[in-house]
Amino acid sequence: MRLLAIITLVVFVAAGIVLGALNAGMVDYDFGFAQVQLPKGAALLGALVIGWLLGGVSAWLGVRPRRSRQTSRADKHPSAKP
């Protein structure tokens, strides 16, 4: 299983490198308070990282209340097993 995860990671890293190399043109971004000029590959990588972080935070926030409810139930109703 670990080998499959490593192979998948290597394939996606290689695809990202190729995608970044093929999209080397510069793109202007205007955020209202700042203007930035980045290569397309860097912009795609930045969008990917920001999406990954936001997805991870939202998943963590969704799981956290469930875990706290489970631990509070376990504290209120201890099992009969020692």
Image: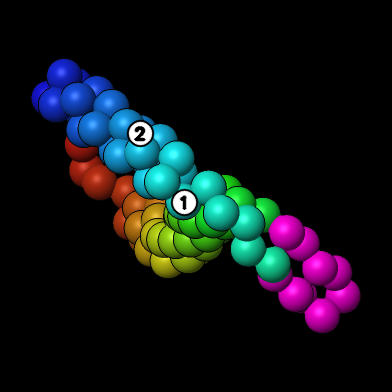
Identify which amino acid the numbered label 2 is placed on.
Val
Identify which amino acid the numbered label 1 is placed on.
Asn
Q: Which numbered disc covers residue 68?
A: none
Which residue has dot 2 on it?
A: 13
Front of the two marks 2 and 1: 1
Which residue has dot 1 on it?
A: 23
Pick the residue in front: 3 or 77: 3
User: Which residues are drawn in magenta?
Assistant: 29-37
How far is mark 2 from mark 1, CA to CA? 15 Å
The answer to whether residue 28 is seen in the rendering is yes
- Could you say whether the residue bearing mark 1 is in a helix, strand or loop? loop
Of the 4 image quadrants, the one containing the C terminus is: top left
Graded by Cα atoms within 10 Å as few (under 14), some (14 to 19) or many (20 or more), the crowding at tag 1 reads: some
Left or right of 58, for residue 46: right
Q: Residue furthest bottom?
A: 32
Q: Where is residue 15 in the image (x, y as percent from the top left)?
A: 30, 39
Where is residue 62, by image quadrant? Answer: bottom left
Q: Who's the residue at 46% across and 51% down the image?
A: 23
Where is residue 1, by image quadrant? Answer: top left
Q: Position of residue 45 (x, y in %)?
A: 51, 50
Query: Looking at the picture, does residue 45 appear above or below residue 51?
Result: above
